[in-house]
Amino acid sequence: MARGIDTKCLHLEEEEGQNIHYGAISYPIYQTATYAHPGVGQSTGYDYSRLQNPTREQLEKVVASLENGIDALAFSSGMAAISLLMELFAPGDHLIVDADLYGGSIRLFSNVSAKNGISFSNVECYRESVESYINEHTKAIYIETPTNPMMNVTDIEALAKIAKKHGLLLIVDNTFLSPYFQNPLDLGADIVVHSGTKYLGGHNDTLAGFLVTNREDISERFRFLIKTTGAGLAPFDSWLILRGIKTLGIRMERAQKNAIEIAKWLQCQEAVTGVIYPGLPEHPGYEIMRKQARGFGAMITFRLKSKEFALAILEKVRMIKFAESLGGVETLITYPTTQTHADVPNEIREKNGITEETLRLSVGIEDVEDLLEELESVFHEKTN
């Protein structure tokens, strides 16, 4: 029987009817580094927590189920997940990557992967001809959709057809929408990336990362790499993410509802020169989002009339926190120029549209009236 995604956040179908772990409703934290063997050549199924741990395994099964994959691997952070992902490639390989990515991904590709002999073409995948960048050494296409922070939307299904035509992997970072709103594997992607720190965890209290795939060969390679490099998520952090996922659906729905209202409010402010939110019909990716996702998310990027005004807002907010990260229950406001994209060269930031007047808002689940009241106060104070 097909299960709804809210049910999948709470239950693994294969466990229903089983009285395992003494009937515990909250999955136990197996806080152990190693496991005793019954005898030579015998095992409980677990040997050493770097290889696997029951709590981490449970989390991985849940995330694989949510993304409709055959396997998911949980890592100590989103960047740890992407770092291991890059071990699929060898010196001389070429990747096509979206020009507008999270600054940490750009930093990794530019300073570590490039040093290891991997080359990159930075392409605006939502509007450029990706196929024209493919060469004999190209192995994969890597995108975010929507992108961070400019909210560009790429047609996953169309890009998957190009990737398969040329025998390439399609890798999609699905952090902004979470598996609640979007499932790239169903649209033809081979690998899905998540910063579990964000919406999956949802409470700004732990770090995590995930790789999910629907291919046995990739799963086997990932399993070898994670035990070799050792970046698996610890048991307690795995439990925190499991707990967060239980409320993923209601959090995503509430945050999105708030985001739509705030985006419309921002559009009416004289000090705002642009609002980028894919849930607005005028967003160029609106129709693609309607086709490939079940929602628009809760991330808003907007530009103000001056750098000074942007900085003043960051200094004046109180309930809304001036902080990095996103996807938690609290609303956060971020200054990409000095935070998420600080290590990205200025010319690349400006080419992607990240100016000193740009702010990024991760809308939380507070009462939207309170969020709007604070924004109204901050904007009014600085415009008078």
Image (spheres, helix red, strand yellow):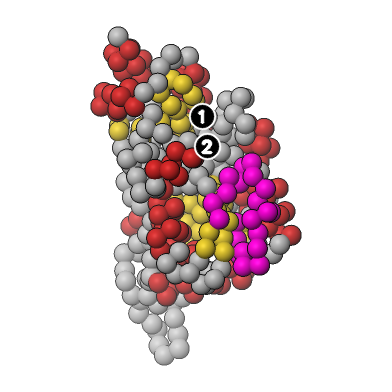
Tell me residue 94's x, y (percent).
Answer: 57, 64
Left or right of 227 in this view: 14 = right
Other residues around mark 2 within 10 Å, as few (<14) / some (14–19) / many (≥20) = many
Q: Quadrant of residue 368?
A: top left
Label 1 vs 2, first from the N-terminus = 2
Above or below, comparing residue 319 to residue 378 in the picture:
below
Q: Residue furthest top?
A: 384
What range of the chain is rendered magenta? 121-141
Q: Is residue 114 within the magenta segment?
A: no
**Tag 1: residue type?**
Ile
Q: Which residue is mark 2?
A: 151
- Secondary structure at badge 1 equals strand
Above or below, comparing residue 297 to residue 155 in the picture:
above
Residue 206 visible? The answer is: yes
**Tag 2: residue type?**
Met
Left or right of 127 in this view: 354 = left
Q: CA distance from mark 1 to mark 2?
A: 7 Å
- Which residue is nearer to you in this view: 38 or 376? 376
- Secondary structure at badge 2 equals loop
Other residues around mark 1 within 10 Å, as few (<14) / some (14–19) / many (≥20) = many
Q: Which residue is mark 1?
A: 276
